[in-house]
Image: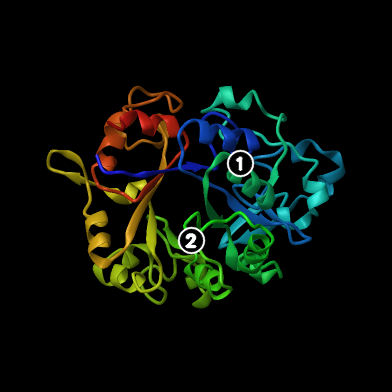
Amino acid sequence: MHTTRVIAHRGASGWAPEHTERAVRLAARLGADAVEPDLVASRDGVLVVRHDNELGETTDIANRPAFADRRRTQTIDGTELTGWFVEDFTWSELATLRARERLPQLRPASARRDGADPILRFTELLAIAEETGLDVVAELKHATHHASIGLPLDAMLADALARTRWIAPGALTVESFEESALHQVRALGVDARLVYLMEHDGTAADLAAREDASADDVSTEGAPSYARQRDDDGLAALAHRVDAISVAKRSLFEPGSDGLRTSDLVERARAAGLGTISWTLRPENAFLEPAHRLGEHDAAWGDWQREWALLADLGLEAVFVDHPDLWRRLEP
């Protein structure tokens, strides 16, 4: 087996509510090399560690009568969402919220900790990472949206890091589904490995916005789709601009005459000079490829060992996992 770095996806989020101090510290104890925080911005310019800028899914905000009038609908990256949004609150208000399990039907044991943990600022997560020895893989979420409302995530990241003396060379990676955000980070002098996140389908939000069209409208013309960026010409171009790509697990599998097999994407990316990372490895049937599911219940664990072993043989630079200890079980 190749040596593959283990990135704890929002902490050990298979065992505890994601993005909480408990999940981050548990990830370190379970053998993770790094932790991945998703970053969004508060109204007063604080980087907040949350899965998304909509708060209803991962906090108890729906149970806070004082915030009921902040619920609204807006369109983000072409998708209409209704809920409570981080950018409508100050950090002092957000600090009163408590985290909830995002997938309670699949992870009821983790959901028993609902309400026990506060949410974190990026600076607080950095301090925990320093104490536990974890590297940091920071994802800038909805960068184009945040920039449009005067909250540029790249500048906020650079400012937060400038006030943090810990970050050692090689300890920080910055990733985004919007490549332009990565270049803005580098232009601000941030010393980080740059990783371009890629959905299996669709088109990056910044490219779609540049064409003044929806992602679906430009998937085959205008701005390049993620799929086009994964062809040989697209990978060669990306290799001049970023250090690695991070792709949906689905992009690494394809049907074969003898069943499911791995694709040649990692090999082609390596030939272009790019590292390849995969997201997100989870053992529940709901997240496994159909060939590896066992039984009919989404929450049941399927044949994750078989699926993950196929990915391990590809020589990936790193994998995102919700259960860092499970990946470690596969290692010799």
> How far apart in space, not on screen, are marks 2 and 1 (Cα)?
29 Å
- Could you tell me the amino acid type at mark 2? Phe
Numbered mark located on residue 177 in the image? 2
Give the numbered dot on residue 63: none
Asked whether the beta carbons under mark 2 and mark 1 sit within 8 Å of each other, the answer is no
Q: Residue 292 at what x, y percent from top left? A: 29, 31
Residue 121 seen? yes
Q: Which residue is drawn at 37% across and 34% down?
A: 327
| Residue wearing tag 1 | 131
Which image quarter: residue 73?
bottom right
Q: Where is residue 61 in the image (x, y as percent from the top left)?
A: 75, 40
Mark 1 residue type:
Glu
Callout 1 environment at 10 Å: few (<14), some (14 to 19), or many (20+)?
Answer: few
Q: How many labels does the image show?
A: 2
| Placement of the C terminus among the 4 image quadrants | top left
Question: Is residue 12 something one can see in this rendering?
Answer: no
Q: Nearer the viewer, residue 276 or 165?
A: 165
